[in-house]
Image: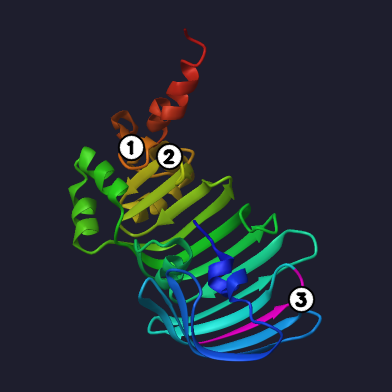
Amino acid sequence: MSLSPQSLLGLSHRHEPQLGTFQGTLYALTEKLALSGKTVGTVSAAGKLEAKHHGGIGYGGRPVWADGTIKVEKSGKLPRVVGQGKSEAGDTHFFFEPHTDPPHVLEVESDDAASVLYLLTDTQAFKGGKLNLRTEFFDDNLTRHESEVRLSNFTVTDAPLLVDILSLVSLTGLLEQLLAGGVFFDEGYSKVSVEEGRYTFTEGSAIGVSTGVTFSGWIDPVKRELDLKGSIAPAYVLTRLISWVPVLGTILTGTDKAGLIALDFRAHGSLDDPEKQVNLLSLAPGILREVFRFDWLDNSTAGEP
């Protein structure tokens, strides 16, 4: 998740105004990010900046919202920013709060998760949804950070890695659904940490009526490498119903509650053409599946020459 508060807030050094009052109607903040509407502000002799923008924000030639307000105050290294915007899908609210000593905090709440994720991560893999995001930045350059991402009522429309995995095991129902218009999920969650350009995902999950997915691992966009693993469980609602019956639930769905029938997968190597592995033995029901997991097999052979 390539969070870029400089882009979101529109305060790269080359755009900072000179002493006095300023106003404008269009700012190209980065190669892709632009503000349209009206911006007014002042810069004091002490270097304090105060600005307010009312209008739209666009990214990559696509409008993120047509009507919004952004307020900026800057007296130190980083600005304090509070903003809100409206799109056809709903409202977005965000603030960035810098501190004398890190962490600096960014929080976003939106009824238009797909547009905000496009703005922050340059991905168009999602449609609709609600988003709650909290990010803590541990340096003034905003390059080392940890995020907690919560999604609800969203659709995944572009997931080539998931398509490949479903194709390997002939889960045609899910594959057809994904290719036709996407897979709908009721809720999604992940922790994401970024350091030296590597994105590490922990506790990742996406839960819907037709399937449940768990995942963890890392992606390095600079080195073009990844190592991700997880499980896919079709008919997840049935799984959850059965898991409520204590003994039967443990036997049939396993101690991890991954699914009545779940498939373990791993993708690693080149980001452009990763090696994909599917553990067909993990299709066994519930507790039997745990005997055949990648982790168990790896641990059992770790000491062998």
What residue is shown with label 1?
Answer: 274
Residue drawn at (57%, 49%), measured in percent from left and top?
194
117 and 60: which is toward the camera: 60
The tag earlier along the polypeptide, 1 or 3, is: 3
| Left or right: 130 as drawn, with respect to 159 | right
The image position of residue 164, as x and y in percent, is 25, 43
Judge whether residue 188 is colored magenta: no
Say which amino acid is labelled 1. Answer: Pro
Please say if the residues under marks 1 and 2 sit with CB atoms less than 8 Å apart.
yes
**Nearer the viewer's eye, disc 1 or disc 3?**
3
Task: Tell me if residue 193 comes above or below residue 89 in the rendering.
Answer: above
Say which amino acid is labelled 3. Answer: Ser
The tag earlier along the polypeptide, 1 or 2, is: 2
What residue is shown with label 3?
Answer: 75
The tag earlier along the polypeptide, 2 or 3, is: 3
Judge whether residue 73 is colored magenta: yes
Give the magenta range.
68-76
Q: Identify the coloring.
A: rainbow
The image position of residue 282, as x and y in percent, is 34, 32
The image position of residue 154, as x and y in percent, is 38, 67
Extreme residue toward the front, this view: 18
Residue drawn at (49%, 38%), measured in percent from left and top?
255
What residue is shown with label 2?
Answer: 226
Do we see residue 39 in this rendering? no
